[in-house]
Image (tube, coloured by chain):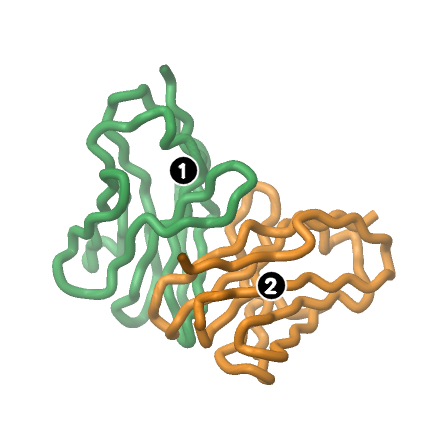
C-alpha cells in the first residue's frame, strides 16, 4: 500500500529565507508525486508534479522539488519565501486510476 | 479556463437527514473524485468515477453514496448524516488516471 508522511505539521520561516518542506513516501513501484498548496478557505492548487526523468522538478512561483528513490523522499524547496507563501502544503502520491494519497499537510507561516 | 464548481459552499444538516453535495466540471475530464478533509488532516478519498453512470469506492466509502449522471456532474450523497461526517468536502477532476487533479473550492458541511 502507498502512504505519505509529512513529518512537520508547522513550519515558520522569515520572509526572504529559504524553505524546505519534507515529504516521505512509501510505494512498491516508482510513484508519481505531487505537491499541492491550499490557501485559506480555498481548494487545492497544483505546485508541481513528478512522473519520471530529472529528479528535480520546477513548479510555479519559484518552487522546486527533488525526488529521491533511495531516500523515498520528495522534498519541496524555495530559495526565498514571500509572505504570500503562507498556506498549507500537501504532498501526495498517485495510485491506480488517479487515486491520490495525501500527507497530513504542513502549515507554513512567514515571519515579517 | 478549466473549472470545478461545488454547491452548496456551506451547509448545516441535522443528524439523520439526507444531504446531497454537487460537483460540476467544465474541463471535459473523464475522472472525478470526492475527498473529505478533517481539520488538521490531509484529504481522504471517498468515491471516484472514471466514466459516466459508474462510480467506485475509495478509501473511506462507508456512509456515502455517489452518483455520476453525466461526464460533467458528480454528486455525493449522505443518506443518513451523522456527526462524524462534519468536514470539508472537495471534488476534483482529471483527464486521466495519472494527470494532475483540479480541485473545486470545497463544501463545508456541519452536521448537528
* Residue lying at the far bottom of the rendered structure: B53
State the count of labels. Answer: 2
Image position of B18 with respect to A55: above or below:
below
Q: Residue at x 75, y 49 (%)?
A: B11
Number of other residues with Cα within 10 Å of mark 1, as a class: few under 14, some 14 to 19, many 20 or more: some
Quadrant into which the N terminus of chain A falls = bottom left
Q: Residue at x 40, y 65 (%)?
A: A2
Of tags 1 and 2, the one toward the viewer is 2
Residue A53, visible in the rendered structure: yes
Image position of A15 with respect to B36: above or below:
above
Check disc 1 and report its element: helix, strand or loop: loop
Q: Residue at x 27, y 44 (%)?
A: A60
Image position of B49 with respect to B111: above or below:
below
* Residue lying at the far front of the rendered structure: B1
Colour-to-chain, green: A
Q: Horizontally, is B83 left or right of A69 in the view? A: right
* Residue lying at the far top of the rendered structure: A112
Residue B108 x/y as whole percent: 67, 48
Residue A4 x/y as whole percent: 40, 55
Image position of B41 with respect to B60: above or below:
above
Q: Nearer the viewer, residue B64 or B27?
A: B27
Residue A38 x/y as whole percent: 46, 43
Q: Which residue is mark 2?
A: B23
Q: CA distance from mark 1 to mark 2?
A: 32 Å
Q: Horizontally, is B32 left or right of A4 in the view? A: right
Q: Colour of chain B?
A: orange
Q: Which mark is residue B99?
A: none
Quadrant into which the C terminus of chain A falls = top left
Q: Which residue is mark 1?
A: A8
Kindly check if marks 1 and 2 are in contact, taking CB atoms under 8 A apart as contact: no
Amino acid at each position: 500500500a502507498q502512504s505519505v508522511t509529512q513529518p512537520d505539521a508547522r513550519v515558520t520561516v522569515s520572509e526572504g529565507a529559504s524553505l524546505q518542506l519534507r515529504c516521505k513516501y512509501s510505494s512498491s513501484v516508482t510513484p508519481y508525486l505531487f505537491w499541492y498548496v491550499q490557501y485559506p478557505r480555498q481548494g487545492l492548487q497544483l505546485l508541481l508534479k513528478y512522473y519520471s526523468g530529472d529528479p528535480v522538478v520546477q513548479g510555479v512561483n519559484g518552487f522546486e522539488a527533488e525526488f529521491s528513490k533511495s531516500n523515498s523522499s520528495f522534498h519541496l524547496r524555495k530559495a526565498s519565501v514571500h509572505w504570500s507563501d503562507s498556506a498549507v502544503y500537501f504532498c501526495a502520491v498517485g495510485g491506480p486510476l488517479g487515486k491520490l494519497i495525501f500527507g497530513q499537510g504542513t502549515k507554513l507561516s512567514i515571519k515579517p | 479556463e478549466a473549472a470545478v464548481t461545488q454547491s452548496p459552499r456551506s451547509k448545516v444538516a441535522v443528524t439523520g437527514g439526507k444531504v446531497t453535495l454537487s460537483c460540476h466540471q467544465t474541463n471535459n475530464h473523464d475522472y472525478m473524485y470526492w475527498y473529505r478533509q478533517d481539520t488538521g488532516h490531509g484529504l481522504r478519498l471517498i468515491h471516484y468515477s472514471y466514466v459516466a453512470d459508474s462510480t467506485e469506492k475509495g478509501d473511506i466509502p462507508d456512509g456515502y453514496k455517489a452518483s455520476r449522471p453525466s461526464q460533467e456532474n458528480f454528486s455525493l450523497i449522505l443518506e443518513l448524516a451523522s456527526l462524524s461526517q462534519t468536514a470539508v468536502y472537495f471534488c476534483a477532476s482529471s483527464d486521466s488516471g495519472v494527470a494532475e487533479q483540479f480541485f473545486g473550492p470545497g463544501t463545508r458541511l456541519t452536521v448537528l
